[in-house]
Image (cartoon, helix red, strand yellow):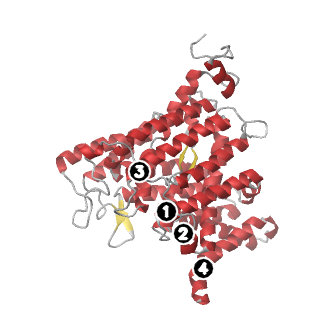
Amino acid sequence: MSSNVITGAAPNTLSGKIDSFFEISKRGSTFGREVRGGFVTFFAMAYILVLNPIILSHALPKGGSIAMPDIAAGTALIAGIMTILMGVVANYPMALAAGLGLNAMVAFTLVLGSGLSFQEAMGLIFWEGVVITVLVLTGFREAVFRAVPRQMKTAISVGIGLFIAFIGLINGGIIRPQGGTVVGLGINGSLMGWPALVFVFGFFLTVVLYAARIKGSILIGIMSSTVLAVIVQLFAKLEVKSDKVPTGWGQTVPQLSVDSWHLPSFGSLGQIDFFGAFGKMGPVAALLVIFSLMLADFFDTMGTMVAIGEAGNLLDKEGNPPRTKAILIVDSLAAIAGGLGGVSSNTSYVESSTGVGEGARTGFAAVVTGVLFLVSIFLAPLVEIIPSEAASTALVFVGFLMMVQVTEINWKNLEVAIPSFMTIIFMPFAYSISVGIGVGFVTFLVVKLARGKIREISPLMWIVSILFVIYFCLGPIQALLS
């Protein structure tokens, strides 16, 4: 018998107790497979340790008390704790970390778009987590899940993917404002400067590695392009991009220094204003933002949970994984933890399927992944040397991964196609995830009414769509009231 197999271990030994608690042998797995699966999952999603600070840095006030390394350390800490909790409480091979799309909504929609402070945005993240937790505990999540058409949920995910890709191209300096058009390629239609080369190198390296099915391709792409950027900076001595230096680095100068090596700081923890957003935005607008955050988080989790269960043959006859409620509760608490930790809502990662592909079947693999996240806290200070041109390659590639779901939408059915299209295009064009969701919901209502299918509109869709109409008209409404 292989040394990795624990079947038959004495029940009173440590290995026997672990086997019994996690049901490792019962699910046909071994210690070795679980550990390998945990490592593979970590390397498949470790890019978030770089991307989350990069994205949330747009929401940080200049000269404030929170820096990118603080976000990186907090991201690793919360991801580690919640992933271990998923393994121990739910016994499911699924890892959690700050959600892409949700962090973009914090930075570009709430802070830059709506004028909230970083702390006020984290307050809304906290309340979103509370709402999801209540939905799970009361069983109302089923009503919410049924109310939104399945293909509309897919459109939300696709729209977020395009939004993220657009941000990546802008941050990477590949797409820029132009004189004659709103945006265009590079500088006057050409890719110029070393930073552009760093982006192109990193992106196509990621593409090649992913096509070759190399695990951790996104992280390898970021790290490799960062190394290239450091080498370029040693010789080129470039400055940060400006009107006078259009071919400079986007945000961070990639150079090693004595200050790059220091103990991690957790300055993001507790940076939260629970009620400030309600006063600044108004109750209706704040509640709609919370609802938008909940949608983006809620349905991704449902899809991820089922996808991982299918990959590991863990679903029952009704297509539900074991301990479904425990899985959803941990995921909901992760959103709350993300707000309290100042790192945006944490959610389940579909990259966990890579670990399942290596043989992971239990929560022990999640515990391994969580421990690796905690260890990675000590690498957090190094995030300061990663230029946006290197990190943005991952944003664009993740956009592709989310875009492939577009085939699940029935484009021949106008009742689905038109609202899905509006959802997808408004997210990048309006630079707002919540606006995309709202426009899609209102369009869904209009198309159904135009076709005389009023009975097919659920009460919840009526309520939310009307609230979004009010949200879009808040300016004129406030002007009339004043």
Amino acid tagged 3:
Asp
**Marks 1 & 2, CB-CB < 8 Å contact:** yes
SS category of the residue bearing label 2? helix
Circle nearer the N terminus (2, 4)? 2
Name the spot of residue 477 as percent of width and height, x first: 61, 84
What is the number of the mark on residue 378? Answer: none
Mark 3 is surrounded, within 10 Å at the Cα level, by few (under 14), some (14 to 19) or many (20 or more) other residues, namely: many
Of badges 3 and 4, nearer the viewer stands 3
Between the C-alphas of marks 1 and 3, the distance is 14 Å
Mark 2 is surrounded, within 10 Å at the Cα level, by few (under 14), some (14 to 19) or many (20 or more) other residues, namely: some
Name the spot of residue 402 as percent of width and height, x first: 54, 50
Circle nearer the N terminus (1, 2)? 1
Between the C-alphas of marks 3 and 4, the distance is 38 Å
**Marks 2 & 4, CB-CB < 8 Å contact:** no
> Which residue bears the numbered disc 4?
473
Name the spot of residue 270 as percent of width and height, x first: 50, 55
Amino acid tagged 2:
Gly
> Which residue bears the numbered disc 1?
119
Using the rendered image of the protein, determine whether residue 463 is visible from the camera's viewpoint.
yes
> Which residue bears the numbered disc 3?
70
Between the C-alphas of marks 1 and 2, the distance is 8 Å
How many labels were placed on the picture?
4
SS category of the residue bearing label 1? helix
> Which residue bears the numbered disc 2?
276
Name the residue furthest top. Answer: 1
Q: Is residue 291 left or right of residue 46?
A: right
Q: Is residue 140 left or right of residue 354?
A: right
